[in-house]
Amino acid sequence: MKFRSGTAVGAAVLGIAGLLVAASPADAQARAARWLLVYEHDDFKGRSAQLSANDSNFINNYWPGSGASINDNISSFRNQGDQRAVMYSDANYTGAAYSALAHSVDSDLTHNSHNPSNFDNVASSVRFVI
């Protein structure tokens, strides 16, 4: 009896571990699909930050190594992910929207033809969509 219950427990533990391992590639793929690099200045200059998840409010997001918020301070981006990133001028995915197609770049958010004409230094939230 002890042998059977030990075997059953061991099999259950292995089954759970298998589920955890099986979830990891999907999680990694989701993260890879979302890869927006935002920059403080035009032409991909100044400080940069990586956004890889939906974020309803940039107010607590800071340029790495500084106390300066990225909120209303993004001037260029590189969308290196497989998903479209929609940046909004206001928190909670509201206000004017800028759609950054997958694998696209914009070196100057001041002049745009297919998005708001001037989205420089106004982004306050981002949502990734397929």
Image: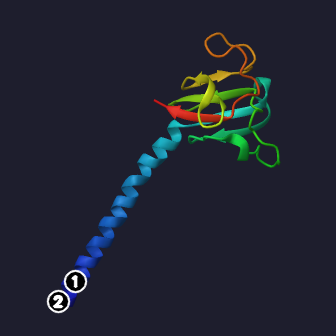
The answer to which quarter of the image holds residue 77 is top right
Q: Residue 82: percent from the left, percent from the top?
A: 50, 31
Mark pair 2, 1: CA separation: 6 Å
Residue under numbered circle 1: 5
Identified by mark 1, the residue type is Ser
Left/right of residue 100 with respect to residue 22 in the rendered view:
right
Q: Secondary structure beneath disc 1?
A: helix
Residue at left 76%, top 47%?
64
Residue at left 34%, top 61%?
18
The answer to which quarter of the image holds residue 49 is top right
Q: Residue 52: percent from the left, percent from the top?
A: 58, 41
Characterize the local packing of mark 1: few (<14), some (14-19) or many (20 or more) Cα atoms within 10 angstroms: few
Residue at left 59%, top 31%?
80
Identified by mark 2, the residue type is Met
Q: Residue 102: percent from the left, percent from the top?
A: 54, 26
Q: Nearer the viewer, residue 88 or 40?
A: 88
- Quadrant including the N terminus: bottom left
Left/right of residue 7 with respect to residue 82 in the rendered view:
left
Left/right of residue 53 with respect to residue 20 in the rendered view:
right
Q: Is residue 47 above or below residue 117?
A: below
Q: Nearer the viewer, residue 115 or 37?
A: 115
Tell me whether circle 2 and circle 1 mark residues in contact (CB < 8 Å).
yes
Q: Is residue 112 above or below residue 5?
A: above
Q: Secondary structure beneath disc 2?
A: loop
- Disc ID at residue 124: none
Residue found at the far left of this picture: 1
Q: Residue 39: percent from the left, percent from the top?
A: 74, 32
Left/right of residue 4 with respect to residue 28 in the rendered view:
left
**Can the viewer see residue 61?**
no
- Quadrant including the C terminus: top left
Residue under numbered circle 2: 1
Residue at left 64%, top 35%?
125
